């Protein structure tokens, strides 16, 4: 058989050429599949903008124009210059049949301290330049007001879905892109509906109801295709059916607009994202992470270590040369040097050794908002400390629709991956030996049987003529206010912050007003000075026990409340949230020790000790007798 290559070429070179041709052939065969994808459209948030300091949806319309199916992963990275990327990449599995297209959603963290101007992200589905595409960064904006429209929202369908003349204040948002969990709706303020979504699966209907119960606003308009009648809802969304012009659903409000033109003139003011030119970063994640990490930081005697290091350099440097440098017996010189190194090494090992009782631990600060029916909306800041270097995978088993994870870092490159996709969502992190890895997590969980979910109920409320509270009693589910669990609480009502304490009477425990001299206006509670003092706590103290961390929460609590209400004056951007409706509503914050079982994370290596602090936030509607 004659070789296709000339015989004059050496055998070794011919083998090399054959290998090169084989690799080229493989590339030719596989490249069409790798290059098959096209990114046809990207949408940030609900109205084209992202809310700073939150996890925001990024919807990507991916198409496969080839005759070969694509079965792989999409990877979203935030560009970080010389670092390659910053934060942790987000990964989604994706299958596309030939000539098919579908929407894929990511939920990246958008920091308050980063500018959207010139910011760029990259979407990858391979390792070559041909298998990636740049994605423009978002413009920053307030929580969105959108109108839900039918269709998949792609291309011309979305552009054609304009609000009718009787709904001029609403931007269109395709119902197919609504998140399947309320954890992904932090960027949504209010929603207009003129029809009942017919193609939604139960998880998406439950997500809308959870978002509403958390404090959202729904505006119902007549359906132009149904003779001008208001839409009727079934199943999970039956709570939207009522003849009243306005009614509460949990902490949310539903408005009924029978006369569109008249009602549009009285719509609540649209939220505005106000920039504070003198404000610093409003991201509270670094502060919370530092406080949690301090719980596993050993109390090393650094002064002694520095002194020992100086003696080591002097003894084995100029000291050794002065005493032994001129000796002719080099063996003695080397022996003394080796013994000196060994002695100092032993001292360093004893003084700086581990042995402070460390074990694998997870410390969590949780903001929990009860939604009713045993469900709770969670925002968690976690620090996972590991005594063995490895790759760890964290999940939220208590969330039926999965959770949303992020390293919440917009400055440094964090080794790991964030997996999305419902129940498959997870945070994979590389954690070195005796190190902690911080991350944030959003989820809606279902409480386990017999577990306390923090549900509160107003029992007694009295006010003076000026509207200030004079008596307040709030009942809680049994066991929630047990001794050693409740730490402190606040009630936010009509511009005032009232401290709460526990009281027992007739065999029941309840919350009541604390000392009158500690009442504060919201302006004082969220003052620049108060926020600065609270921010400095995590940088000034080391918390060795949960009790110490809880004690400092008395000063850090305004930061968590500010995160829940958008009241942080230090922030570069003030993110608006729906405040309690004057004397008609009240926000109650209750801080407790520990992490309920359904709130806890799971790790693939096995059970881990998890502890921390939980701050429950619940909005209570006040009875008619208390409204003045």
Image (cartoon, rainbow, N blue to C red):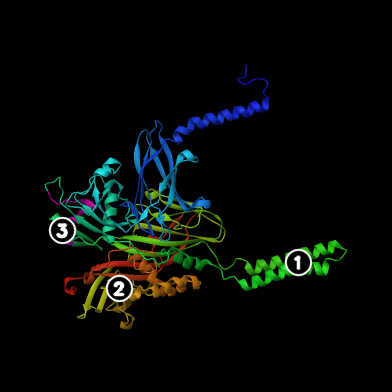
The residue lying toward the viewer, choosing from 551 and 506, is 551
Frontmost of labels 3 and 2 is 3
At label 3, counting other C-alpha atoms closer than 10 Å, the crowd grade (few under 14, some 14-19, many 20 or more) is some
Rendered view: 78 above or below 505: above
Rendered view: 380 above or below 465: above
SS category of the residue bearing label 3: helix
Residue at the location (24% across, 55% down)?
A: 191
In the image as oriented, which residue stretches furthest toward the right?
328
- The percent position of residue 64, horizontal first and vertical second, equals 38, 36
Report which residue position mark 3 lands on: 263
- The percent position of residue 281, horizontal first and vertical second, equals 42, 64
Residues at marks 1 and 3, CA–CA distance in whole angstroms: 84 Å
Q: Is residue 239 magenta?
A: yes
Residue 387 appears in the rendering: yes
Q: Is residue 134 magenta?
A: no
Report which residue position mark 1 lands on: 317
At label 2, counting other C-alpha atoms closer than 10 Å, the crowd grade (few under 14, some 14-19, many 20 or more) is many
Identify the mark nearer the N-term, 2 or 1: 1
Residue 455 appears in the rendering: no
**Segment tinted magenta in the rendering:** 228-246
Report which residue position mark 2 lands on: 491
Rendered view: 588 above or below 388: below
- The percent position of residue 124, horizontal first and vertical second, equals 45, 43
- The percent position of residue 51, horizontal first and vertical second, equals 35, 57
Identify the mark nearer the N-term, 3 or 2: 3
The residue lying toward the viewer, choosing from 258 and 553, is 258
**517 to the left or right of 228:** right
SS category of the residue bearing label 1: helix
At label 1, counting other C-alpha atoms closer than 10 Å, the crowd grade (few under 14, some 14-19, many 20 or more) is few
């Amino acid at each position: 058989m004659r070789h296709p290559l000339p015989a004059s070429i050496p055998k070794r070179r011919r083998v090399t050429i054959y290998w090169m041709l084989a690799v080229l052939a493989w590339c030719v065969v596989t490249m069409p599949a790798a290059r098959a994808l096209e990114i046809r459209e990207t949408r940030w948030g609900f109205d084209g903008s992202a809310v700073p300091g939150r996890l925001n949806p990024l919807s990507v319309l991916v198409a496969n124009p080839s005759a070969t199916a694509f079965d792989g992963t999409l990877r979203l990275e935030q560009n970080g210059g010389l670092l390659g990327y910053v934060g942790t990449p987000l990964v989604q599995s994706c299958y596309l049949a030939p000539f098919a297209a579908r929407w894929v959603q990511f939920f990246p963290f958008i920091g308050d301290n980063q500018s959207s101007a010139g910011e760029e992200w990259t979407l990858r589905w391979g390792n070559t330049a041909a298998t990636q595409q740049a994605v423009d960064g978002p413009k920053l904006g307030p929580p969105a007001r959108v109108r839900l429209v039918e269709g998949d929202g792609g291309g011309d369908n979305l552009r054609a879905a304009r609000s009718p003349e009787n709904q001029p204040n609403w931007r269109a948002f395709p119902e197919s892109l609504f998140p399947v969990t309320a954890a992904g709706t932090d960027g949504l303020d209010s929603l207009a509906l003129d029809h009942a979504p017919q193609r939604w699966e139960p998880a998406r209907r439950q997500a809308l109801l959870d978002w509403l119960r958390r404090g959202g606003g729904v505006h119902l308009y007549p359906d132009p295709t149904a003779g001008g009648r208001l839409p009727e809802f079934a199943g999970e969304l039956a709570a939207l059916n009522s003849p009243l012009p306005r009614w509460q659903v949990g902490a949310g409000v539903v408005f009924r607009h029978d006369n569109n033109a008249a009602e549009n003139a009285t719509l609540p003011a649209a939220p505005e994202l106000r920039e504070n030119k003198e404000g610093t970063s409003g991201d509270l994640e670094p502060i919370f992470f530092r406080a949690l990490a301090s719980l596993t930081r050993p109390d090393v005697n650094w002064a002694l270590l520095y002194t020992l290091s100086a003696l080591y350099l002097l003894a084995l440097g100029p000291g050794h040369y002065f005493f032994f440098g001129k000796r002719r017996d080099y063996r003695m010189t080397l022996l003394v040097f080796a013994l000196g190194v060994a002695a100092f090494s032993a001292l360093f090992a004893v003084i700086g050794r581990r042995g402070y009782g460390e074990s694998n631990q997870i410390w969590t600060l949780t903001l929990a908002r009860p939604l009713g029916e045993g469900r709770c909306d969670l925002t968690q800041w976690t620090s996972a400390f590991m005594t063995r270097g490895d790759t760890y995978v964290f999940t939220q088993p208590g969330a039926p629709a999965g959770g949303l994870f992020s390293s919440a870092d917009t400055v440094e490159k964090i080794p790991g991956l964030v997996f999305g996709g419902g129940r498959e969502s997870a945070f994979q992190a590389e954690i070195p030996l005796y190190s902690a890895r911080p991350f944030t997590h959003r989820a809606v969980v279902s409480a386990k049987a017999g577990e306390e979910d923090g549900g509160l109920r107003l029992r007694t409320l009295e006010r003076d003529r000026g509207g200030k509270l004079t008596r307040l009693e709030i009942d809680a589910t049994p066991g929630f206010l047990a001794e050693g669990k409740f730490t402190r609480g606040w009630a936010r009502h009509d511009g005032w912050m009232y401290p709460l304490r526990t009281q027992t009477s007739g065999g029941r425990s309840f919350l009541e007003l604390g000392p009158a001299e500690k009442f504060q206006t919201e302006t004082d509670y969220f003052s620049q000075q108060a926020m600065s003092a609270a921010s400095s706590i995590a940088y000034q103290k080391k918390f060795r026990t949960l009790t110490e961390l809880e004690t400092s929460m008395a000063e850090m609590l305004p930061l968590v409340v500010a995160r829940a209400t958008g009241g942080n004056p230090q922030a570069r951007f003030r993110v608006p949230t729906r405040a309690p409706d004057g004397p008609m509503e009240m926000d109650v914050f209750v801080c407790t020790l520990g992490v309920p079982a359904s709130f806890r994370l799971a790790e693939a290596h096995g059970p881990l000790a998890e502890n921390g602090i939980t701050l429950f936030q619940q909005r209570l509607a006040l009875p008619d007798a208390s409204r003045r």
